[in-house]
Image (tube, rainbow, N blue to C red):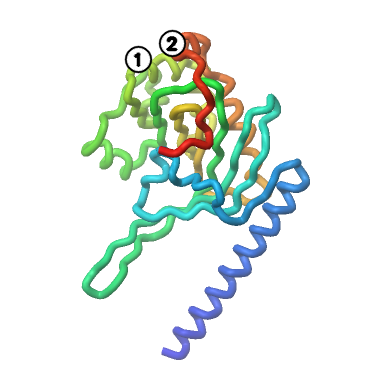
Amino acid sequence: MCAGFVLFGVLSTLAFRRKARRNLELARLAAEHGFTYVEDDLFLSARLPFKIFRLGNRTQVENTMLGQTRDGFPVRIFDLAVWEEKQTEDGTSESRHRFLTCCLVETDHSFPHLVVQPDTLATRLLEKVGMPSIDLESEAFNRRFLVTCEDERFARMFLDPQMMELMLATEGEFQFEVRGGAFLVAGPQLPAHLCLSLVGLSSRFRELVPPVVLEYHPDLPPVFGGQP
C-alpha cells in the first residue's frame, strides 16, 4: 500500500510539472507571436454550442491564446479536456479524459450547424442514435469522415472538392465544425510549439468557403462571443 501511495505521488508530481511546463511554453509562444495568453477559461468557450464540447458531461478549458488571423479575424486557441462523470453507489466514477487542442475563428457570416468528424467506431455508434451521416460524391471522404448538418443542402454546397481536399489532407485527425459566426477545428492535444499551426488550418478552412454558400447565407453580425 505504501508503495502505491509513493507511486501515485511520483506520477502526480510528474503530471504537475508537465502541465506547468506546457503553460510556460504556451505563454512564451503567445508573447512571441503577438497573442494574449490566459491560463483559465475567462471566455466560457465550452458553453458555445459545438458538438466537440458534448463528448462528455464534463469539460475543462485552459491555456487560451487570443489573437487575429492574417486578415484580421479574431481567433482563439485553447486546450480542452472532456470526460464522463457519473455518480455510483461507491462514489464518483470518471471515464478516461480526452485531451484536445481547439481553434475558433470568427467570420462575418452566420451559418447552420455543420459537423465533419473523423469516422471511428465510436462516431458510427453515435450515428445510430442521432442524425444520419450525409454521403457525398467522394468515396474517400465518406470513408474518412461523418458529416451531419441541420441543412443538407448547405452541407453539400459547403463541402465542395476544395474543402474536402483540405480536410482529407489532415488524414482524419481533426474535427471541423461551423455554427453561427464561428469556425472550429479540434484534434488531439498538440505539443505547445505546434498549437499556433491550427490558426493557419482554421483560416484556410474559412477562406475556402465556396462563393455559392456566401450567396445562400447573407451577412449577419458576428456571434463569436455569443452564448448558446
Residue 26 in the image, given as x and y percentages of width and height: 67, 52
Quadrant location, the N terminus: bottom left
Q: What x and y, as percent, mark residue 11? A: 53, 74
- Residue 99 located left or right of residue 37: left
- In the rendered view of the protein, which quadrant contains the C terminus? top left
Q: In which image quadrant can residue 83 be found? A: bottom left
Distance from Cα at disc 1 to Cα at disc 2: 10 Å
| 62 is higher (above) or lower (below) than 68 | below
63 or 174, which lies in front? 63
* Residue 7 seen in this snapshot: yes
Write down the residue under mark 2: 216
Q: Secondary structure at mark 2?
A: helix
Identify which residue, 219 or 141, lies in the foreground: 219
Question: What amino acid type should be assigned to the residue bearing mark 1?
Answer: Arg
**Residue, x 40% and y 27% (percent of image)?**
114
Q: Are marks 1 and 2 in contact (CB under 8 Å)?
A: yes
Q: How many marks?
A: 2
Residue 53: name its quadrant. Answer: top left
Q: Amino acid at mark 2?
A: Tyr
Residue 139: x %, y % from top left = 37, 22
Characterize the local packing of mark 2: few (<14), some (14-19) or many (20 or more) Cα atoms within 10 angstroms.
few
**Residue 144 visible in this rendered orientation of the protein:** no
Residue visible at 64% across and 42% down?
66
Q: Which residue is mark 1?
A: 153
Q: Earlier in the sequence, mark 1 or mark 2?
A: 1
Secondary element at image label 1: helix
